[in-house]
Image (cartoon, rainbow, N blue to C red):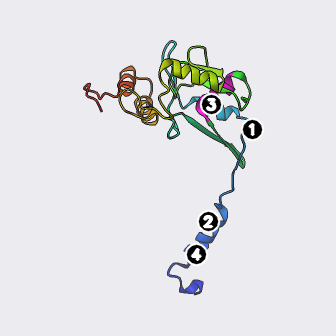
């Protein structure tokens, strides 16, 4: 088949040009990729802050099945995907976390990225497990909340409630798994 045999010969040239110009560059995962100012601004643009001493809620990508926020950024051909709360901790300490550091949610909210003593603190895996057991929230690898939802589904509900900004009533309904008229979802 020649170009003359193709009903729209110009499209053949266009298709070849597009294939050549939009070929995806492979990206390399780089756990040590430093964030730029633009990356940091992008991160905070996905956070809704509760007033006062409340949580700072991550309202972007959420990982399944654990319900934690995920943040992805790139520079050139390198990229990094990190848990949102770990990224917030790295910003707070101005550098990367050691692999053995766990960020413990004292507020028990997987989407919280507020770094302070009442919300997100540096910890160890054993301290984090002890805290979860003491609170009765470690009932298995992925326990359900008191309303029968997985942590992932609960996080999706909270994100949906806050995606357009802080709304205390919508947040309450999402946390309690009740609809606008007080009916269980």
For mark 3, what is the residue? 41
Tell me which numbered mark, 1 or 2, is placed earlier along the sequence: 2
Tell me which numbered mark, 1 or 4, is placed earlier along the sequence: 4
For mark 1, what is the residue? 32
Closer to the observer: label 3 or label 2? 3
Q: Mark 3 and mark 2: span between their CA atoms?
A: 32 Å
Residue sitting at x 71%, y 40%: 31
Q: State the image coordinates of residue 45 (x, y, percent, origin top left).
A: 56, 31
Residue 88 inside the magenta-drawn segment: yes
In this view, 143 is above or below 117:
below
In which quadrant of the rendered view does residue 38 lie? Answer: top right
Q: State the image coordinates of residue 4 (x, y, percent, origin top left).
A: 56, 86
Quadrant occupied by the C terminus:
top left
Query: SS class of the residue under badge 4?
Result: helix
Q: Mark 1 and mark 2: span between their CA atoms?
A: 33 Å
Closer to the observer: label 3 or label 4? 3
Residue sitting at x 39%, y 20%: 168
Closer to the observer: label 1 or label 3? 1
Which residue is nearer to you in this view: 70 or 2? 70
Q: Which residues are magenta?
A: 83-92
Quadrant occupied by the N terminus:
bottom right
Query: SS class of the residue under badge 2?
Result: helix
Is residue 91 left or right of 84 when viewed as pictured? right
For mark 4, what is the residue? 12
Residue 61 inside the magenta-drawn segment: no
For mark 2, what is the residue? 18
Q: Mark 1 and mark 4: span between their CA atoms?
A: 42 Å
Is residue 149 left or right of 54 when viewed as pictured? left
Tell me which numbered mark, 1 or 3, is placed earlier along the sequence: 1
């Amino acid at each position: 088949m020649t170009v003359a045999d193709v009903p729209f010969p110009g499209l053949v040239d266009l298709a070849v040009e597009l294939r050549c110009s939009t070929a995806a560059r492979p990206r390399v995962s780089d756990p040590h990729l430093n964030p730029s100012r633009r990356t940091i601004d992008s991160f905070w643009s996905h956070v809704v802050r509760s007033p006062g001493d409340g949580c700072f809620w991550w309202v972007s990508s959420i990982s399944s099945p654990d319900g934690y926020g995920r943040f992805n950024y790139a520079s050139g051909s390198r990229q990094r995907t990190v848990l949102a709360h770990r990224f917030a901790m790295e910003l707070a300490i101005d550098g990367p976390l050691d692999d053995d550091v766990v960020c413990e949610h004292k507020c028990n909210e997987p989407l919280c990225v507020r770094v302070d003593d009442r919300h997100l603190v540096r910890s160890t895996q054993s301290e984090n497990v002890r805290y979860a057991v003491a609170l009765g929230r470690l009932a298995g690898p992925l326990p359900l909340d008191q309303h029968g939802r997985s942590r992932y589904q609960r996080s999706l509900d909270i994100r949906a409630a806050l995606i357009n900004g802080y709304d205390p009533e919508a947040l309450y309904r999402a946390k309690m798994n009740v609809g606008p008229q007080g009916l269980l979802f």
